[in-house]
Amino acid sequence: MTQSDKELVEAVIKIPPEEEAAVYLLYERYTPKFKKLYTDIYQDMSWYEDCMSDLFAYLKGKNQDWRTFRTFEWRSKFSTWIGQVARNRFLEIKPYLIGKIEKPLSIDDNENGKKPVVLPDEYLEDYERRQRKVLLLEAVGLLKDMDQKFVILKTLQGYNSAEIADLLNQKWQKDGIKKYDNKGQLVVPTPGYVDVRRQRAKEQLKRIIVEL
């Protein structure tokens, strides 16, 4: 992407929002800045993805309208503002991560020493942990969006976003699947597309698991 920060933010807050733009901002453009902020707070990268998931959810908001982005008035640099927001969120979530979660069950990428937390299983015995995994797989099976199901299952198998995008592209070609965005342009699976699907799937899984 070659858009400016302002163009990307405007894409995120429009109706309907373009979450791909948000994923690009948070997981690609500002990754170096976020990792620097993170390492100033934590001693290792174990909880980085947890912090990023929290930041993504915070910016998206409970109503999924990206209200926090809407409040930014462009009186300062966006990079300065988003850095301060990220630092505050990283600090706020630290006591929860360090104090309460010891053995995470992850549905995020397993690369680069990441230990993301989606379904915490604090101090559980092996049997209970297996039961959690069974519950997670049952919930994945109930996902209605086949792309979300594919992304989550491949994530659990240890594939990263780029690898999943390639596998998904192969699957679409094999099944003759063609998808178009709201502008009528042909969608090609990319790491950004995978990240959006994963984030949406995680939100769906949390709701499904509560109902199970």
Image (cartoon, helix red, strand yellow):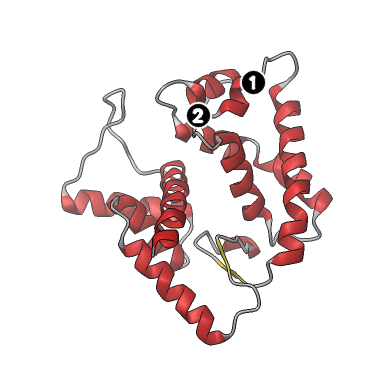
| Res 71 quadrant in image | top right
| Res 186 quadrant in image | top left
Task: From this view, report whether residue 202 is shown above or below residue 28.
Answer: below
Could you say whether the residue bearing mark 1 is in a helix, strand or loop? Answer: helix
Task: From this view, report whether residue 82 is shown above or below residue 119.
Answer: above
Instruction: Tell me if 100 is positioned left or right of 18 in this view.
Output: right
Looking at the rendered structure, the kind of residue marked 2 is: Asp
Q: Residue furthest front?
A: 211
User: Real-space Cα distance between discs 1 and 2?
Assistant: 12 Å
Residue 25 visible in the current orientation: yes
Q: Which residue is mark 1?
A: 71
Q: Which residue is mark 2?
A: 65
Looking at the rendered structure, the kind of residue marked 1 is: Thr
Residue visible at 60% across and 60% down? Answer: 116
Q: Please state the horizontal and vertical placement of residue 151, each as a whole percent of the image.
A: 38, 56
Residue visible at 44% across and 27% down? Answer: 17
Instruction: Tell me if 109 is positioned left or right of 153 in this view.
Output: right
Residue visible at 55% across and 35% down? Answer: 60
Marks 1,2: beta carbons within 8 A: no
Residue 3 visible in the current orientation: no
Q: How many marks?
A: 2
Task: From this view, report whether residue 153 is shown above or below residue 3.
Answer: below
Could you say whether the residue bearing mark 2 is in a helix, strand or loop? Answer: loop
Q: Nearer the viewer, residue 136 or 3?
A: 136
Q: In the drawing, what numbered circle is on residue 43?
A: none
